[in-house]
Amino acid sequence: MNNKIKKIIRKKNKSKIICLTAYSKNISSILDNHCDIILVGDSLGSVLYNYKTTRSVTLNTMIEHSKSVKMGIKKSLMVVDMPYKTYRNPKEALKNAKQILSKTKCNAVKLEGGKKIINIIKHLIKNKIPVMGHLGLLPQSETGKFSFKGKKIAERKRILRDAKLLESAGVFSLVLECIEKTLAKNITNSIKIPTIGIGASSHCDGQILVTDDLLGLNPINVKFLKQYSNLRRIINNAVSNFKKDVRKTSFPKKKHSY
Ligand code: KIV
């Protein structure tokens, strides 16, 4: 097992795992100093490309963004989402995962789902592809209105069972998306691999957010999000100052000219 992955697993019950998304080198090079894991999430479909769902994201789009992200990373573990319909069976998943790893030089891939895709995940791991799991709200499977998971007993049992199945299949960590807090706690305490929460309470071993949301670049309003900056306002001010300078010919000055 890769040393970076071992280091992530060892953090369980010791220190919280810091994880954020990146879609480009300018962002990943800033995150790298702070994060344990940088995820090239297929959330880029809605955040950057304005797709209605992540289902329209292609393998090629993920690979090109990941190549850019990789350029900004020196120390963090880099994980890339396998997009929709790229892991419908073990053979297809292995071919595409190998392509992602070889073209982007990332450390691992992430797949959404539990029991339904367990044989696919086992096949990847048997072939030395490190895999991060993803349970709870699964954006590739749900196209309607998103809501949190763990309201019903049957659903709670299924998600806990899936977490245990993924752990025994060999995934090195598990994203829990939009999961009720006592269920997230129960899962985290029931498995030895770290859980990384997004809308899944502070009981998880680590936290992830979509960086564009955290920075206030992507104007969304969801309960689990804390916006740490308002980059839209900052960019707006900078661009407005540029416009004023150009109009009154105070930019460019002599020092900006050849
Ligand atoms: O696609 C993504 O950005 C994700 C995170 C929200 C976990 O899967």
Image (cartoon, rainbow, N blue to C red):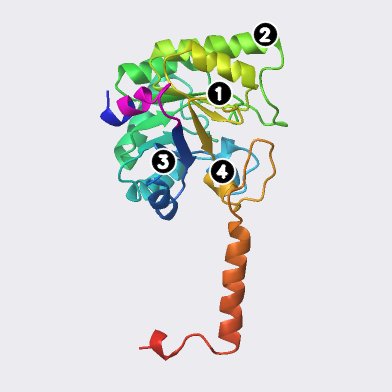
Identify the residue under disc 1: 203
Q: Quadrant of the N terminus?
A: top left
Task: State how many labels appear.
Answer: 4
Secondary-structure class at tag 1: loop
Q: Residue at x 41, y 52 (%)?
A: 30
Q: Which is more foreground, mark 1 or mark 2?
A: 1
**Are the residues at dot 4 and dot 2 in contact (C-beta closer than 8 Å)?**
no
Q: Which residue is mark 4?
A: 45
Distance from label 3 to label 2 (Cα)? 35 Å
Q: Quadrant of residue 221?
A: top right
Question: Of helix, strand and loop, which one carries label 4?
Answer: helix
In the image, which is nearer the foreground, mark 4 or mark 2?
2
Q: Which residue is mark 2?
A: 154
* Quadrant (top left, top right, bottom left, bottom right) of the C terminus: bottom left
Q: Along the polypeptide, which appears first: circle 3 or circle 2?
A: 3
Tell me where residue 182 appears, x and y as whole percent: 63, 17
Residue visible at 69% across and 9% down in the picture: 153
Q: Earlier in the sequence, mark 4 or mark 1?
A: 4
x and y percentages locating residue 257 in the rendered image: 39, 88
Question: What residue sits right under mark 3 in the picture?
Answer: 35
Q: CA distance from mark 1 to mark 3?
A: 19 Å
Instruction: Give the x, y percent position of residue 203.
Output: 55, 23
Nearer to the camera, 62 or 248 = 248
Tell whether label 2 touches label 3 (CB within 8 Å): no
Quick one: label 3, few (<14), some, or many (20+) residues within 10 Å? some
Tell me which segment is drawn in magenta: 6-16
